[in-house]
Image (cartoon, grey):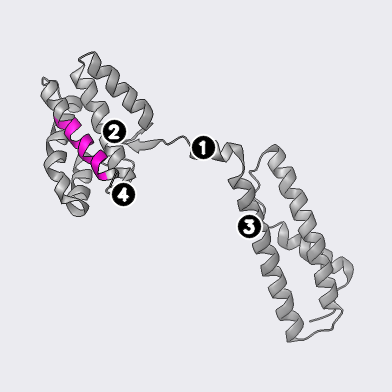
Amino acid sequence: MADLTDDEARDLADEILQRDEFLPAGEPGIAAQVLQRITEAIGDALAWLFSGFGGLGGGAGTLLATILLVAAGALLLFAIYRAFVNRNPRAKEEKSTGTRVVFDEIVEPEALRAQLAELKSAADWRGAVVAGFRLAVVGLIDQNIAREVAGATTGDFSRAVHARRPELSEQYSPAAAAFERAFYSDLDVDQNDLADVEALLNRLQMAGTR
């Protein structure tokens, strides 16, 4: 390996740190400026180190040292970037929304609880059954009984319950039947249907507090 001049060391460091995998292009505003400053600082350090090792002459040892420095610089930049993203208020806000995908709809558990209480108070059994069963599906997802998959059906969730928590089948089956009647048909839905859904909710709540 030939000796590296200062300019060549700087070019090598810049080329490494400006690759897409190390510097995401989608960061907006201040984030991009902060990451650019971090990149420049690490680039200066790498250029200095490359230059120092280049002055030691060629050979396998110098090549290995250079490769290790490249890897160390890349890992350092990635670690700093991840720490920055984790402290980004906007990223925290997105993580704290608590939304779930249930039957191809984005739902928020707290909103579902409020909706369930409101519909139950108004004796809207059909609406309460739908909201309650969706909330039960959120419980299945949060307890890792079922996966959050767009397009999943009551049958998909039933298979997950049978496979992972068969003891919940006794509550799940009538609750799912009540939901299907309320959501997919014009058949009458009454307080007994809501009771089936609430039985599943209560069982999931008990399981979640263990």
Q: Earlier in the sequence, mark 1 or mark 3?
A: 3
In the picture of the structure, the residue carrying the numbered disc 2 is 135
Measure the C-alpha gap from mark 2 to mark 4: 14 Å
Looking at the rendered structure, the kind of residue marked 1 is Glu
Question: What kind of element bears circle 2?
Answer: helix
Query: Relative to 93, does residue 118 appear above or below in the rendering?
Result: above
180 vs 117, left or right, is: left
Q: Nearer the viewer, residue 125 or 18?
A: 125
Q: Which residues are magenta?
A: 196-207
Question: What kind of element bears circle 4?
Answer: loop
Which of the numbered marks, if any, corresponds to residue 82? Answer: none
Q: Earlier in the sequence, mark 1 or mark 2?
A: 1
Question: What kind of element bears circle 1?
Answer: helix
Looking at the rendered structure, the kind of residue marked 2 is Leu
Q: Residue at x 37, y 37 (%)?
A: 100
Q: Position of residue 133 (x, y in %)?
A: 23, 32
Q: Earlier in the sequence, mark 4 or mark 3?
A: 3
Query: Relative to 135, does residue 67 appear above or below in the rendering?
Result: below
Looking at the rendered structure, the kind of residue marked 3 is Ala
Query: Relative to 33, does residue 123 appear above or below in the rendering?
Result: above
In the picture of the structure, the residue carrying the numbered disc 1 is 94
In the picture of the structure, the residue carrying the numbered disc 4 is 144
